[in-house]
């Protein structure tokens, strides 16, 4: 498939860089913007459909800092309030909902690329979830890549991202506790667990791919912390007790 379309990709890290590469390979005129890498925006970059993949760090209290996303989106919509924006950065449900209510052309789409296989992941990706009030542009965009597009609202799309990542983190924490209790050859037990399709073969390794016990990496620790904080602050002081215990268990293992 060869298309000609100008698009701005904000953030040239693992997700943004992978999307930029993928789009360039498919004939898009891509503008990469990442001031930290010396890739500065021009006035024109705010006028084209934009994919935002910038950091949204989780602070020490679990609050997610969405200020970079808010700043970029605000400038884009100030230039043209109808410019389609797709946010791939992980943001909590309350912020996804707020942005969607503030800007009609805002769409949130959860991303699950892995650092080790990002380019293969984006090529083999079958499903794309879009959350927003006006997702038509991005529905046509991903349909052109033969993706199965699922439409929902921004809050639900964010809940999906956090639900999956925190469930998998909890699965890792539980497998580590099982390994402690079992005390034998974990690979032998794991191979039996894999026979049950309800479990799936993912996230059963102890230790993990980084050679350490517990869960780590770029996403799981911050997303677990953020979702626990979100539930307490924005969901009527709800406690995610199982997730909290998984978090505490993992902290002890990763010391």
Image: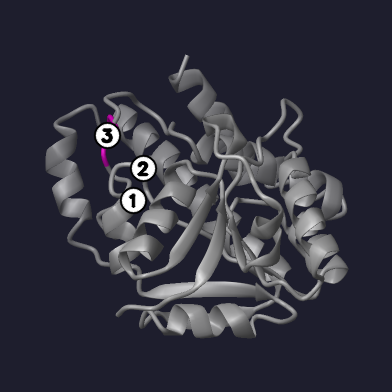
What kind of secondary structure does the magenta stretch mostly adopt? loop
Distance (Cα) linking label 1 and label 2 = 5 Å
Which residue is identified by label 1?
A: 118
The magenta stretch is: 205-209
Q: Residues within 10 Å of mark 1 (few under 14, many from 20)?
A: some
Q: Is residue 113 left or right of residue 63?
A: left
Query: CA–CA distance between discs 1 and 3?
Result: 16 Å
Could you tell which of marks 3 and 2 lies nearer the N-terminus?
Answer: 2
Q: Which residue is mark 3?
A: 209
Q: Tell me which numbered mark, 1 or 3, is placed earlier along the sequence.
A: 1
Query: Is the Cβ of the residue at disc 1 closer than 8 Å to that at disc 2?
Result: yes
Quarter of the picture holding the N terminus: bottom left
Whether the magenta-drawn stretch holds residue 208 is answered as: yes
Figure check: 237 above or below 7: above
For the view shown, which residue lies furthest in the front direction? 43
Identified at 36% across, 70% down, the residue is: 27
Compared to 149, does 228 lie above or below?
Answer: above
Q: Which residue is mark 2?
A: 115
The one of 126 and 239 positioned closer to us in this rendering: 126
Residue 96 picture quarter:
bottom right
């Amino acid at each position: 498939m060869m298309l000609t379309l100008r698009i701005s990709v904000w953030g040239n890290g693992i997700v943004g860089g992978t999307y930029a590469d993928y789009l360039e390979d498919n004939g898009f005129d891509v503008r990469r913007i990442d001031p930290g890498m010396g890739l500065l925006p021009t006035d024109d970059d705010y006028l084209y459909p934009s994919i935002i993949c910038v950091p949204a760090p989780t602070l020490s209290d679990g609050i997610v800092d969405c200020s970079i996303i808010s700043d970029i989106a605000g400038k884009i919509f100030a230039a043209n309030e109808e410019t389609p924006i797709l946010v791939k950065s992980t943001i909590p449900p309350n912020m996804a909902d707020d942005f969607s209510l503030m800007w009609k052309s805002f769409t949130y789409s959860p991303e699950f690329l892995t650092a080790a296989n990002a380019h293969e992941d984006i090529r083999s990706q079958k499903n794309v979830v879009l959350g927003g009030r006006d997702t038509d542009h991005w529905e046509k965009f991903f349909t052109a890549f033969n993706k199965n597009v699922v439409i929902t609202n921004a809050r639900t799309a964010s809940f999906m991202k956090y639900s999956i990542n925190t469930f998998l983190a909890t699965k890792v924490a539980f497998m580590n506790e099982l390994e402690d209790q079992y005390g034998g050859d974990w690979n032998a037990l794991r191979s039996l667990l894999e026979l049950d399709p309800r479990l799936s073969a993912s996230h059963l390794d102890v230790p993990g791919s980084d050679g350490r016990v517990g869960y780590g990496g770029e996403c799981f620790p911050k997303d677990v912390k953020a979702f626990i904080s979100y539930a307490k602050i924005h969901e009527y002081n709800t406690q995610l007790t199982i997730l909290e215990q998984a978090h505490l268990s993992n902290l002890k293992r990763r010391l």
